[in-house]
Image (cartoon, helix red, strand yellow):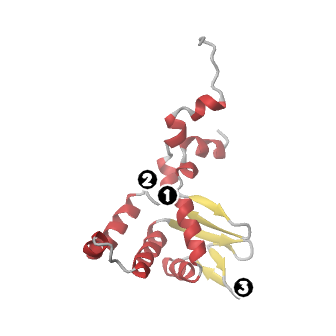
């Protein structure tokens, strides 16, 4: 190697910081998941989002024994996770039809953003919940270099 070695795409991929370093402010403030006609803003489910980790631990504490014995009812487990994500991960939503803070309902009505309405939407659309939760867990969406690139730095 020479002193004039340039970073290549392969070099960046060999750097663990490029692959795993996240921007803690982005993890907390959130990113926008664009679904075309609507969006949902989410913080990271994990990472530096201590609120998510604490809330999940608090909600599952009464069920610790059932969880350890693998006897936790699946529907109760899903409900606790939906509630935790709605309370600590989803930061907002909006739609092209109704604007920021309002989701489009099944019959076209505006649904204002609230934790209760997020939980209700997730219960009615479990596949949407699954996608939002999976996206909120992805390190790649909260990487420091990705955040800088998105900001034009």
The circle drawn on residue 44 is: 1
Contact check, label 2 and label 1, Cβ < 8 Å: yes
**Which corner quadrant of the image does residue 128 belong to?**
bottom right
Name the image quarter holding the N terminus. top right
Name the image quarter holding the C terminus. top right
**Going from the N terminus, do you reach mark 1 or mark 3 first?**
1
Picture coordinates of residue 149, whole percent (x, y): 64, 42
Which mark lies nearer to you, 1 or 3? 1
**Going from the N terminus, do you reach mark 2 or mark 3 first?**
2
Picture coordinates of residue 63, whole percent (x, y): 29, 76
Residue occupied by mark 2: 47
Q: Residue furthest left?
A: 65
Nearest the camera: 101 or 22? 22
Image-based side of 4 in relation to 79, left or right: right
Q: Residue at x 71, y 88 (%)?
A: 107
Nearest the camera: 7 or 66? 66
């Amino acid at each position: 190697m020479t002193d004039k070695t340039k970073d290549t795409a392969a070099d960046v991929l060999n750097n663990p910081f490029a692959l795993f370093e996240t921007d803690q402010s982005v993890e907390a403030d959130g990113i926008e998941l664009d679904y075309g006609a609507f969006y949902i803003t989410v913080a990271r489910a994990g990472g530096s989002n201590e609120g998510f980790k604490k809330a999940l631990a608090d909600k599952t504490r009464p069920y610790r024994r059932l969880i350890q014995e693998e006897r936790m009812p699946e529907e109760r487990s899903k409900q606790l996770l939906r509630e935790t994500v709605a309370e600590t991960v989803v930061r907002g939503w909006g739609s092209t039809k109704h604007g920021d803070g309002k989701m489009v309902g099944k019959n076209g009505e505006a649904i204002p953003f609230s934790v209760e309405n997020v939980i209700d939407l997730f219960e009615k659309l479990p596949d949407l919940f699954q996608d939002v939760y999976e996206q909120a867990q992805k390190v790649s969406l909260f990487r420091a270099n990705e955040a800088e690139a998105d900001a034009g730095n």
